[in-house]
Amino acid sequence: MTPDSRPRPARPGLTLIEVLLALTILLLSLAAIGQLVGIGSDHGLYARMTARGNRLAEAKMAEVEAGVVSVQSGGEGMFDDDSAWTWVVESQQAGPTNLYQVTVKVSRTVRGKPFEITLSQMIFDPAMMGSAAQAEQPSDQDLQAAESNTTGTTTGTTGTGGKSP
């Protein structure tokens, strides 16, 4: 036998088709992972905007409750600390006197799309509610009656307690 006629042993290694197939799988998986990163980023932005919008809406509702923003006339504007956000306060009479259904809408544009948070609550008009400064002082008769009730019911013994083991 001549050296050229002997069968060649199989070479350990990869063929060109196997290498191309592996590269194709790698590229497809990288594209899918890139899409997942983008989706995760969008959801993270949505969560941050929702949290910020809720805080701003609650702050504006607290201003309405405190009487800084009128319950009856409502209002709209931009926030001083974040001018990208705008607010609108709307209210409707809700049955009993001085009770209003107040809706606060906070909105902004994120990546070219409108984003809005709405908060709604029943509130008594703070302008119509009494304050502590308007409270009447109790009359002398009321004070005497209160004193007689507390002194008549106070009984007990003086001294220190018993022994401890």
Image (cartoon, grey):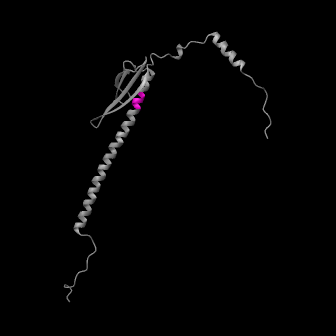
Q: Nearer the viewer, residue 99 or 163?
A: 99
In the image, residue 35 lies in the stretch drawn in magenta:
no
Rendered position, 164 above or below 158: below
Q: Position of residue 124 (x, y in %)?
A: 44, 20
Q: Residue at x 29, y 55 (%)?
A: 30
Rendered position, 148 above or below 17: above
Q: Which residues are magenta?
A: 55-59
Quarter placement of the N terminus: bottom left
Q: Position of residue 51 (x, y in %)?
A: 39, 36
Q: Residue at x 24, y 63 (%)?
A: 21
Res 159 visible: yes
Q: Quadrant of residue 112?
A: top left
Q: Main secondary structure of the magenta part?
A: helix
Q: Residue at x 42, y 24 (%)?
A: 122
Quarter placement of the C terminus: top right
98 sits to left or right of 25: right
